[in-house]
Image: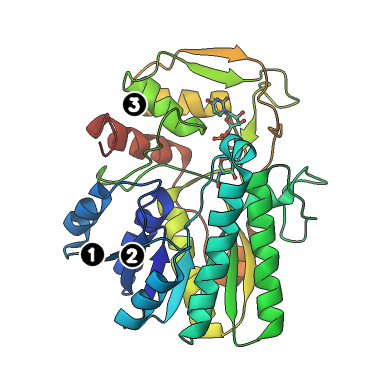
């Protein structure tokens, strides 16, 4: 049985990928330092997965801890999620972001190298495409970063390209996520950001459940169908299954790949709000306010390459994303607290 180490395994995308990998027959070892996640996730995964999760509490910046994990488990591949991801926070704390996101990636790869593990899935982001030269973004689109968080992902990608060039035994999947939303259909795990949510969907769900008074819509005068920002939202379980497909590709084809993971469809803020109201039956009061600095008006994915090379495409639509988000938040009004 192939054993996969997930760094950042207790996080939003990590926890959903954990379930998808188990369902696909992989053995999973989860690793997390709980700097941006809750230990309660492990209890939920035990309940959903039907077995006690194999878990190691450690930071990806702790080389000795990583060596101990590789010594304790026979790891065949790694999926690296562990990273801080708040764009605004990254501007205020660049060193923390570079130490954790870039330093943590380097440390994880060094531990892999010491233990002869050279199959890696890297959690990247559409943010590496920067200002759109054309849309939809395909994998050939020029790369640039518009903020510290984005630079940690761009530098991470380039570090891994140098690593692969230095040793072709490395098989790496660079996965460029668009906007993950939604939750596992059970409603037992989901997105639980700390403090005020930066991202749209968790803010909407917190308004719906009564934790926030109203949604601020950042800008109503963009050159988009209804003037509000357009993004490519994909269901987190589709994204999780994209990681299964990417791992299978690396293990079966023994070749690296860089690919978008998105639906190929753009959705505006107000379209998402309306879909959520339909799915939840709850009104989402909002006020249109100034644009958020650094936001792009619109972007979405060209999903062709993942379909052709990974045999993966998204299957869940916006209504399912909203219904599953609501099921999670209504059953867990305070998240995992
Ligand atoms: C989506 C749309 C906002 C909140 C960021 C990172 C990206 C990834 C996902 C980590 C935009 C609007 C939002 C709100 C709003 N993070 N909005 N009111 O900015 O596309 O991407 O998060 O991997 O790397 O850059 O996502 O959810 O913040 O915003 O109107 O309270 O919703 O203006 O149009 P974004 P988002």
Judge whether 88 appears above or below 150 on screen: above
Q: Earlier in the sequence, mark 3 or mark 2?
A: 2
**Is 139 on the left or on the right of 307, as rendered?**
right
Would you say the beta carbon of the disc 1 residue lies within 8 angstroms of ligand 1?
Answer: no
What residue does disc 3 label? 280
* Rendering coords of residue 126 (x, y %): 64, 50
Q: Earlier in the sequence, mark 1 or mark 3?
A: 1
Camera-near label (3 vs 2) is 2
Which image quadrant is residue 45 in?
A: bottom left
The residue at the far right in this view is 133
What residue does disc 2 label? 30
Q: Is residue 302 visible?
A: no
Camera-near label (1 vs 3) is 1
Residue, x 34% and y 82% (percent of image)? Answer: 71
* Rendering coords of residue 43 (x, y %): 19, 53
Mark 1 residue element: loop
What residue does disc 1 label? 53
Mark 3 residue element: helix
Please report contact status of discs 2 and 1: CB closer than 8 Å, yes or no: yes
Density class for disc 3 (Cα within 10 Å; few <14, some 14-19, many ≥20) is many
Residue, x 69% and y 42% (percent of image)? Answer: 147
Would you say the beta carbon of the disc 2 residue lies within 8 angstroms of ligand 1?
Answer: no
- Nearer to us in this view, 334 or 283: 334
Residue, x 66% and y 20% (percent of image)? Answer: 219
């Amino acid at each position: 049985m192939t054993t996969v180490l997930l760094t950042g395994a207790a996080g939003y995308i990590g926890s959903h990928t954990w379930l998808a990998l188990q369902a696909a027959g992989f053995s999973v070892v989860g690793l997390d330092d709980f700097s941006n996640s809750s230990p309660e996730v492990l209890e939920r995964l035990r309940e959903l997965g039907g077995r006690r999760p194999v878990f190691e509490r450690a930071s990806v910046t702790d080389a000795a801890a990583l060596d101990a994990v590789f010594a304790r488990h026979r790891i065949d591949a790694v999926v690296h999620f562990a990273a801080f991801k708040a764009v605004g926070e990254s501007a205020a704390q660049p060193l923390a972001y570079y130490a954790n996101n870039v330093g943590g990636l380097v440390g994880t790869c060094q531990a892999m190298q010491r233990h002869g593990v050279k199959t890696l899935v890297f959690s990247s982001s559409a943010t590496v495409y920067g200002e759109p030269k054309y849309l939809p973004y395909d994998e050939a689109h020029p790369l640039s970063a518009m903020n510290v968080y984005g630079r940690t992902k761009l530098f991470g990608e380039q570090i891994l390209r140098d690593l692969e060039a230095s040793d072709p035994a490395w098989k790496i999947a660079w996965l460029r996520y668009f906007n993950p939303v939604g939750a596992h259909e059970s409603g037992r795990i989901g997105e639980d950001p700390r403090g005020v949510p930066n991202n749209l969907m968790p803010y909407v769900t917190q308004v719906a459940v009564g934790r926030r008074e109203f949604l601020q819509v950042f800008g109503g005068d963009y050159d988009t169908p209804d003037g509000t920002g357009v993004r490519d939202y994909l269901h987190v379980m589709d994204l999780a299954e994209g990681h299964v497909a990417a791992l299978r590709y690396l293990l079966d084809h023994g070749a690296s790949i860089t690919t978008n993971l998105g639906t190929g469809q753009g959705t505006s803020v107000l379209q998402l709000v309306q879909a959520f109201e339909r799915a939840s039956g709850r009104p989402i009061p909002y006020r249109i306010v100034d644009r958020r600095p650094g936001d792009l008006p619109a972007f979405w994915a060209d999903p062709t390459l993942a379909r052709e090379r990974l045999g993966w495409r998204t299957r869940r639509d916006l209504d399912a994303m909203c219904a599953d988000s609501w099921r999670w938040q209504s059953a867990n009004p305070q998240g995992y607290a």
